[in-house]
Image: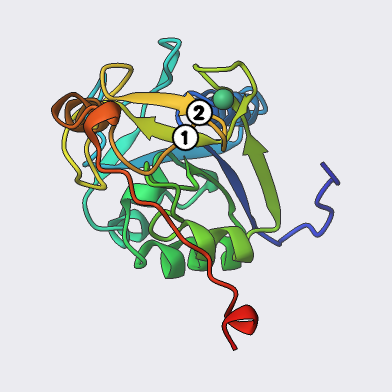
Amino acid sequence: MIPHTHPTSGWIEVVCGSMFSGKTEELLRRVKRVHYAKQQVQVFKPVTDNRYDANDVVAHDGVKIEGIALDQPHHMLYLLHQNTKVVGIDEIHFFDENIVPVVQSLADRGIRVICAGLDQNYQGRPFGPMPTLLSLAEYVTKLHAICEKCGAPGTRTQKTGGSEQEVEVGEKDMYQARCRACHHSGIDQLENARQAEFPLQILPFFQVNIVDKREEN
Ligand SMILES: [Zn+2]
């Protein structure tokens, strides 16, 4: 990363990727380095993410740091300490578009804002405010997981159970990292049930006849 030299300027960093790609671990690594340097840092996350702990930001490996859970992004501005130099925001994809002006405002005030979130939902579509944040950020880090089917770099999140809701908090019970080739936009459990109901061998076979119109004329 190129060092940021302007003494009063803030900036936005986005750490994105699929589930199990180490986004929160990377956020915590950056936040801990700031903490060691004795700079004031605050960490926020949306209330939707109630895994592990209501307020702390906890990575899959169990490392945690004190954080504040919010339902409204602009509350961040009220809760900001005067001396805060760095703000970390975990699971930022769960916030709506209102997070964007808040992040911009923090960076404009001279704060380094580190955002971590899923770039795509389980269907492989851009997730909530992420496309906007990615285009506004000064620095972008895209992390990869490992595809649980073939071992290739995992860039997508496969939903293996649960409902068709876009936002459904779960872990290994409901999600897997997959590569592009092994990922599909449905839910594994539902696909399996569908296939059990209509096995491949009894599916009607549609023959496609290609007629060359030139020969007919
Ligand atoms: Zn794969």
Q: In the structure shown, which secondary structural element does the residue marked by tag 2 occupy?
A: strand
The location of residue 8, given as percent across then percent down, is 71, 61
In the figure, 64 relative to 71: above or below? Answer: above
Query: What is the quadrant of the C terminus in the image?
Result: bottom right
How packed mark 1 is, by other alpha carbons closer than 10 Å (few <14, some 14-19, many 20 or more), is many
The location of residue 88, given as percent across then percent down, is 49, 41
Which of disc 1 and disc 2 is earlier in sequence?
2
Q: Are marks 2 and 1 in contact (CB under 8 Å)?
A: yes
Say if disc 2 is inside 8 Å of ligand 1: yes
| Residue 128: quarter of image | bottom left
Residue at the spot x=64%, y=40% of the render?
Answer: 142
Q: In the structure shown, which secondary structural element does the residue marked by tag 1 occupy?
A: loop
In the figure, 210 relative to 180: above or below? Answer: below
In the figure, 59 relative to 7: above or below? Answer: above
Give residue 178's mark: 2
Confirm whether residue 55 shows in the render. no
